[in-house]
Image (cartoon, rainbow, N blue to C red):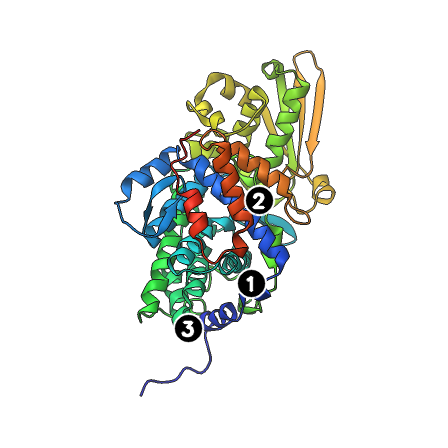
Amino acid sequence: MAKQRAQESTIELLARAIRSVHADAVSQAAIEQAKLLLLDTIGCGFAGRREPAAQATLRAMPDSPGSCAVIGQAARTGMTEAVLLNGVLIRVLDLNDYIIGESHGEPESGGHPSDNIPVALAVGATRQRSGREILAAIVLGYELYARLQQAMDRSGPWDGVTVSGLVAPAIAGRLMGLSEQHLSHALALGAVRAATPSIVRTGDISAAKSLANALVAQSGVQSALLAEHGATGPLAVLDDERGLRDVFSRAAPSSLIAPFPADGAIMRAHVKTYPCINTGQSAVAAALKLHAMLNGNASSLSRIEVTMADYKVTKRHQDDPDRRNPMSREAADHSFPFIVAVALLDGRFGAEQFEGERWRDETVTGLMSKIVLRRDAAWNARAPGSYPCAIRAIDAEGTEQQVEVPYPPGYSQRGLDADIVLDKFNGVTDSVLSRAERARIVDTVMEFDQGPSAERLNAAIAIEGQSK
């Protein structure tokens, strides 16, 4: 007879907490927020299809007929393939949502919880779940994602996408209706394939940044499928020193397994207005304001002081030498000097600002060389919980101009602004979708919680996006 364990593992208790949440218990405010974030995520997917990393992923995946939609593609595919493809599409521009965590009383990067929305869409479609059930799974996923991110040291050796090794099977297992035992093993199997080194988001950043979460999420869904058919995982993976205990050591296990609220972390999600790192959103907004004040004459500037809050995360990003002189698209959207310089020069900031390897352009690099990055602790109190920015520009004659942005567009203090989300969606999809196609997607998403399945949404997004 097998020896009975003295106590349940954290994984088992987490599975019980996940299964205890009923879709009807999720607040309507959270459902409305989830719909806005779903719309934003779909828009990012359409906008990202032309990017090299997205194209490489689309070409690499074999044809696999199935019932799951791929954003911007008429042909449907299988469940795990859709998770990977859509995951890369929505992430590749660094334009999808973000949350801000906390570390020792300071704001800290909290990752992009919408990275796992493709899991909910694919599994929900395959298992014929209602729109509200899918949205409720997304709300739960955001909360678990935030808890796990909070338990990690974001300045340590492991990247934040590691958490999706638990979030993806949690979302998938819930929508599959797994028992508590099977869900426990799905989480354990997902966890053992999750650990991702932080090099994917540091140094000479590669396409792995765009692929990392999608690969972990795909593995997490596979883990749920394996567990459904009886495969087991190490249930002590979050408790044992030989597992991931030290990866999630910054929070007590009790914080992971606490009852899930009716809304939670999804209400703290922000949308990005600009395709760059979340700590740079206010910097771009400030640079665009300054461009208008300079009448487009940014090249005349002799010194540009970019001052941010004095947080460990902004120091970490400012001090990364590879962000000072980016050598790739992925590094450029993480480079404060690049995003400020190109916004100052162009007076706009979208995917087109990266075309032609602008980070190598002499006009851009010349302006980047004039940028001085600073931090000021006064910002910490003036705009708590945000990544604010002030820019002071001085021209050759000594004339000064100064702008500041405490909270960037898309920052959610009391819930997302639906108009901002809608404007962004229309803006990023204008070049690939007709007005009628955009309207159909918006209407379908806004009514998603009333639908019996994901089929109407699948039909709306599974279009080639070239009919304009």
Residue designated by label 2: 313
Judged from the image, the secondary structure of the residue bearing numbered disc 2 is helix
Residue 369: x and y in percent read 54, 22
Sequence-wise, the earlier of marks 3 and 2 is 3
Categorize mark 3 by other alpha carbons within 10 Å: few (<14), some (14-19), many (20+). Answer: some
Residue designated by label 3: 179
377 in relation to 364, above or below: below
The residue shown at (66%, 22%) is 393
- Residue type (three-letter) at the residue carrying disc 2: Val
The residue shown at (57%, 42%) is 271
Give the residue at the far left of this rendering: 62
Residue 447: x and y in percent read 55, 50
81 in relation to 377, above or below: below
| Quadrant in which the C terminus is drawn | top left
Sequence-wise, the earlier of marks 1 and 3 is 3
| Quadrant in which the N terminus is drawn | bottom left
